[in-house]
Amino acid sequence: MSVPALFSDLDVTLIYSLSQLHKRGQSSAGRFVAEEYQDVPLSFVKMETWQQLAINAGNLFDFVPTTTRTFDQYKRIFFPAVDIKAAVVLNGAQIVINGKEDMDWSREVAAGVAAHNYLPLEVLNLLQEKLEGCDEVKTLRDADQLFNYVVAQSSDSPYVDEVTKEISELTGFVRSKQGRKTYLVPATVSKGRAVRELITRWGSTMTFGAGDSLLDFTMIPEVDYFLNPVHGDVPPAEKNVFRTTREGIDASEEMIDFVVNTIKK
């Protein structure tokens, strides 16, 4: 028997770094550490949000983290006692079932990327050429040769904005700026496509998506309800889109409460 499913972005939707907390006048005190790297806490989740997930994931609904993180970055996330049926990583390029990559799906996505007019490596070369010597740039990153992103020294990076917009228009890659990071992603690498695939496989009866950025909005046509934290990018005005009233880490609790209450109606 199929059950409802929640496909939720992680960073700045469910979990928050210290800088994201401080940006909104919020604290890590009383929060659960959701990610560590080299024994240093990196991300936090609100205790009430984690408790709701621990109680309801795997019982009331299937919980599917849906993130732009690579698989290795995703594996740093720690949600104890939370049943996770599957995960969508690399912005939809990989589906993880029971901790293992679904190779059939990965090959299908890779084939779509290879058929694009521009390859991610070519886009990376364009970025390197245009941004060489630019003091706004901290680093350029390649995500498993599927998409690229620029990490700037600060979120105020006008030249990086100009170059990435220009390359997006030239190549057709989707541009999404999230704080200091600006992503350039082929349209075939989409959270929405991966979400649709899992909904089809499972026959999920009631579906929810949640996310703060443009890259999450591809889930909107695929789910019954899409939840958007009020601090995030503004989504299209669709009937199934609901914005929170609370911001920052408090929005995560409001979104999980929405899911639980809607299912229990």
Image (cartoon, rainbow, N blue to C red):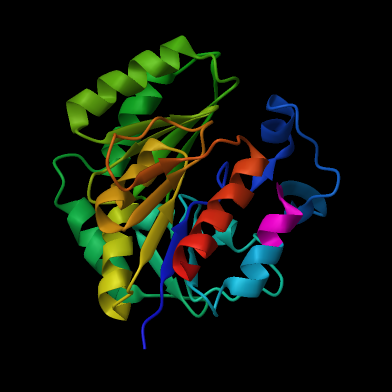
Q: Is residue 202 magenta?
A: no
Estimate the x, y position of residue 107 in percent, counting from the top left. Answer: 26, 68
Q: Nearer the viewer, residue 230 or 198?
A: 230
Q: Nearer the viewer, residue 132 or 61?
A: 61
Estimate the x, y position of residue 79 in percent, counting from the top left. Answer: 67, 66
Estimate the x, y position of residue 215 in percent, counting from the top left. Answer: 37, 42
Q: Nearer the viewer, residue 113 or 77?
A: 77
Whether 96 is drawn above or below 144: the answer is below
Q: In this image, 172 relative to 68: left or right?
A: left
User: Which residue occupies 27% across, 64% down?
Assistant: 196
* The furthest residue to the bottom: 1
- Image quadrant of residue 201? bottom left
Whether 76 is drawn above or below 13: the answer is below
* The furthest residue to the top: 158
Residues drawn in magenta: 44-50
- Label total for image: 0
User: Which residue occupies 27% across, 40% down?
Assistant: 238
Q: Is residue 15 visible?
A: yes
Estimate the x, y position of residue 261 in percent, counting from the top left. Answer: 52, 61
